[in-house]
Image (spheres, helix red, strand yellow):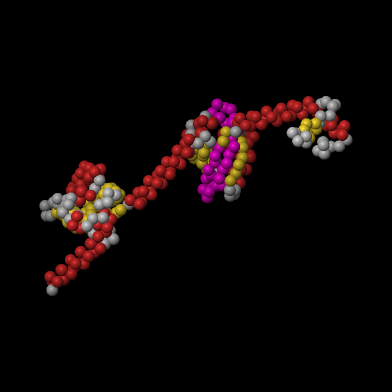
Amino acid sequence: QKEEDLFRSEERFRKLYTDTPTMLHSIDNEGRIQNVSKRWLEKLGYELDEVIGHKSTKFLTEESRRSAAEQYLPKFFKEGYVNNVPYQYVTKGGDVLDILLSAISEKDDNGNIIHSLAALEDITDKKQAEEKIHAAEENLKHTFDISPSIIAKANLDSGSFIEANQAVTRILGYSIEEFTSKPFMEFIHPDDRQRTIDEASEQLKGKDVTFFENRYLCSDGSYKWMAWHGTRADENGIVTAIGSDINERKIVEEEIIKTKQFYENITEGVQDGIWVTDKDNVIFYANSAMEKIAGIPREQI
């Protein structure tokens, strides 16, 4: 009866071992595989007779065999266990699986390893997903770094930039550390500060996307016109903004306004009636003398 009970107990453990959804393998003190679970065979594509008696390292990539010999096996023989060792296994079809291996040993009375059991977790899909995320992050960082416009994150509650790209140096002359170490209001022209405060308040209230222009202090003491596109603030008061250098455009606009004002002053100071037409002969400007001559307001002219 005891023999039958022992046999049934062994059968239960054998079935539990072979049918477990986990990849398992058992090896002897020479590193040869004694048994594997069905999941192990399914993952790597081998039949049982192709595996039993072979060194477990046979199924590793060359790089993993080297790291096993130099790093992980000495640790295992010394301590009797390892956890989450990164290995790469090669399937029968030649595919490479990324595996995390944890193993525990059974020792004799003299402390020598006579048997070990290892559980293997296939993390191939997880690692590929992580690599894709990492590649996407690298691409985003590259775009962030080479952007000709300033890309920055600001905390509207504390009133400071918390992150910025290298365009800060190219456009304003500050290092990133200098730009993020002061309240951003210190960089803004005094005449533009209230308008900037109003925009920030709108963002904190949930305004989706904002666009505004203001003047920023450069490292050489001059001011430069910037155009900002910003997102609404999140629950922590953080916004992301893109700032473009529009200083040359603003200078041209101011010169046009001055030139327009100059010629208007001239035309308004003469007694002759003057009008200006476009290519379709439509009048788009008339001076005050023309109003008197025509006897009607220039808006009607």
The image quarter containing residue 278 is top right
View extreme (bottom): residue: 1
Q: Is residue 21 visible?
A: yes
* Nearer the observer, 180 or 213: 213
- Taking the image as shown, residue 148 lies to the left or right of residue 282, namely left
Specify the principal SS of the magenta part. strand
Residue 217: x, y in percent?
Answer: 57, 31
What is the total number of numbered labels drawn onto the structure image? 0
View extreme (left): residue: 110
* Nearer the observer, 288 or 61: 61
In the image, what residue occupies the spot 18% across and 50% down?
A: 55
Residue 171: x, y in percent?
Answer: 54, 31
Residue 145 colored in magenta in the image:
no
Residue 279: x, y in percent?
Answer: 74, 33
* Nearer the observer, 145 or 56: 56
**Which corner quadrant holds the N terminus?**
bottom left
The image quarter containing residue 220 is top right
**Which corner quadrant holds the C terminus?**
top right
User: In the figure, 12 relative to 230: above or below?
Assistant: below
In the image, what residue occupies the spot 54% across and 41% down?
A: 241
Q: Is residue 113 visible?
A: no
Residue 281: x, y in percent?
Answer: 78, 34
In the image, what residue occupies the spot 75% across and 27% down?
A: 263
User: In the figure, 233 relative to 48: above or below?
Assistant: above
In the image, what residue occupies the spot 78% across and 26% down?
A: 266
Residue 217 colored in magenta in the image:
yes
User: In the figure, 76 relative to 279: above or below?
Assistant: below
- Residue numbers of the magenta segment: 216-243
- Taking the image as shown, residue 137 lies to the left or right of residue 151, namely left
